[in-house]
Amino acid sequence: MKFNDKLQQLRKQRNLTQEELADVLYVSRTAVSKWESGRGYPSIDLLKAISKLFSVSIDELLSGEELISLAETESKEKAESFSDMVFGILDCTMALLFFLSFFGQQGDGMRYKVSLIALTDAPDYSRIPYIVLVPLTVVFGIAILAFQSFHNRIWVKSKLLVSLMLSILSVLIFIITGQPYATIFVFCLLIIKGVLLIKQR
């Protein structure tokens, strides 16, 4: 017997509705309905709560195959959550460009290192992309961190790709406009993202 059938049977034996079981487990009725229709499994922690509630072991609730599938799913979700957190933090790190002296600026016949905020003598064709791209990357990093549990299909598939593209674009713009320190800084962030994506595959 599969997990969804076992759960439904155990719930009915206790004379519980899906709503009542959901209340006991602190989940939505939709989650219970999803489990009972075979469209998903609860997390390991919820499985423990279900096994305790109905006084059965986890082995009785799940077949070996289902247990392996659940463990693989949880492992994948944890890896994705870790990637989201790292990408989000790296994108937020771009805010340092506003405060640290990564940019070169001419003044009094000398070239000074200044922060993005203090960069005033750069031509508009280079300064405007900096001012647009850096905050955009930071805001996107905040969005990745804030919406980790948002499971929209388009968002899940595109968020890391967009983050990667923003870093690549930043590196290219800093190279083209002759900002070596900013280029090295953003390139290091890009390498970390690349290594993380390769390991995740």
Image (cartoon, rainbow, N blue to C red):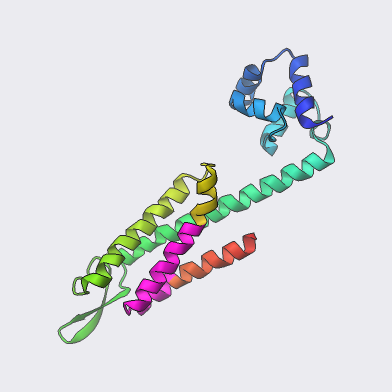
Quadrant position of residue 135: bottom left
Quick check: 72 above or below 13? below
The residue most toward the left is 108
Query: What's drawn in magenta, residue-wise?
Result: 161-186
Quick check: 63 above or below 22? below
Magenta stretch contains residue 20 = no
Q: Residue at x 57, y 53 (%)?
A: 82
The residue most toward the top is 15
Residue 24 shows in this picture: yes
Side of 89 where 45 appears, left or right: right
Quick check: 23 above or below 157? above
Side of 11 where 77 appears, left or right: left
Quadrant position of residue 54: top right
Closer to the camera in the image, 114 or 32: 32
The location of residue 13, given as percent across then percent down, is: 78, 15
Closer to the camera in the image, 14 or 171: 171
Q: How many marks?
A: 0
* Dominant SS in magenta: helix
Q: Residue at x 35, y 57 (%)?
A: 136
Residue 119 shows in this picture: no
The location of residue 159, given as percent across then percent down, is: 49, 53
Q: Quadrant of the N terminus?
A: top right
The residue most toward the front is 154
Magenta stretch contains residue 164 = yes
The location of residue 15, given as percent across then percent down, is: 73, 12
The location of residue 201, given as percent across then percent down, is: 65, 60
